């Protein structure tokens, strides 16, 4: 499985944008980039995913580098409820490889 | 609508005992996953079902662990002869079909004493 590298922790001020980086230099052509987050005492929650183009949804934006070896999850205006562990995961689209392989993620702290 | 439901939410058992953990996926979801999460770590894949069959059980740590999904809906994770190292939060997730967004339950916290 292709691996991802994320910073262990980040801090951000409330109501400011947050940029969470992820490196995936060994990504293959059939790997989608998925982001999940896990709030304290909760199961992981889907945030966003993409293949090549930048993606936007109600929760966040995903910016993917042109060579696809890195990506950035963007929270446009952080709130206290965004404090969580954020996981960047590569998921192969080929049948039989649907499992999500979590790393240790980035623990995001929001400062009021 | 209801999300993924896992029962019990907490389970304390003695070393050597047998336990069953239940997962009720979102209605109509054909894909179901089990994960295990130890403190400070990300979730670790155990097994994936597509319908009634286990499509990938490569994450099961040893033969004490077994999971079933007999009717393609509810799934049960079974652990025989529990060990203290089995203590963790066991997470279940389901997807409308394989490869799509996974919806996770709140997990079952298993403590083996």
Image (cartoon, helix red, strand yellow):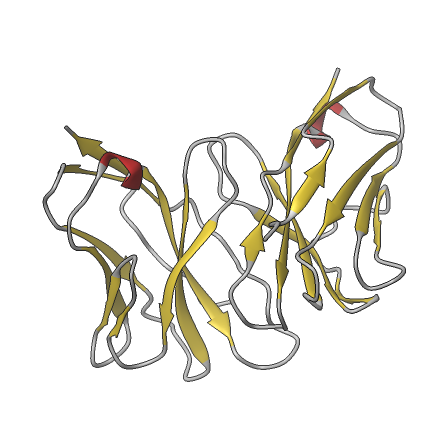
How many discs appear? 0
Residue drawn at x 89%, y 25% is B17
Counting from the top left corner in percent of width and height, residue B2 is at 62, 49
Picture quadrant of residue A68: bottom left
Q: Residue at x 50, y 37 (%)?
A: A42
Q: In the picture shown, does residue B91 fall above or below A47? A: above
Q: Nearer the viewer, residue A105 or B33?
A: B33
Image: B40 above or below A106: above
Q: Relative to residue B36, is residue A77 drawn left or right?
A: left
Quadrant of the drawing holding the C terminus of chain B: top right
Which residue is located at x 59 percent, y 63 percent? A99
Side of B111 where A102 appears, left or right? left
Location of residue A98 with respect to A93 vertically, above or below: above
Residue A101, x across and y down, in percent: 52, 58
Q: Residue furthest bottom?
A: A29
Between B40 and A36, the one nearer to me in the picture: A36
Residue furthest to the front: B1
The x and y percentages for residue B65 are 82, 44
Residue A51 image offset from top left, x and y in percent:
36, 79
User: Relative to the observer, which residue lies in front, B26 or B63?
Assistant: B26
């Amino acid at each position: 499985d292709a691996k991802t590298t994320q910073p262990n922790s980040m801090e951000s001020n409330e109501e400011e944008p947050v940029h969470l980086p992820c490196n995936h230099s060994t990504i293959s052509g059939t790997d989608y980039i998925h982001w999940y987050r896990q709030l304290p005492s909760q199961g992981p929650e889907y945030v966003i995913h993409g293949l090549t183009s930048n993606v936007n949804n109600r929760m966040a934006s995903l910016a993917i580098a042109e060579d696809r070896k890195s990506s950035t999850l963007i929270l446009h205006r952080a709130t206290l409820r965004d404090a969580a562990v954020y996981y960047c995961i590569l998921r192969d689209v080929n049948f039989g490889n649907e499992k999500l392989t979590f790393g240790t993620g980035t623990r995001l702290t929001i400062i009021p | 609508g209801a999300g993924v439901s896992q029962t019990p939410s907490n389970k304390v058992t003695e070393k050597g005992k047998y336990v069953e953990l239940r997962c009720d996926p979102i209605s109509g979801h054909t894909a179901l996953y089990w994960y295990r999460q130890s403190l400070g770590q990300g979730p670790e894949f155990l097994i994936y079902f597509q319908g009634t069959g286990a499509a990938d059980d490569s994450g099961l740590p040893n033969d004490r662990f077994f999971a079933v999904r007999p009717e393609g809906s509810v799934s049960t994770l079974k652990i025989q002869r529990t060990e203290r190292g089995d203590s963790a939060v066991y997470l279940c997730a389901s997807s409308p079909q394989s490869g799509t967004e996974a919806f996770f339950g709140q997990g079952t916290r298993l403590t083996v004493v």
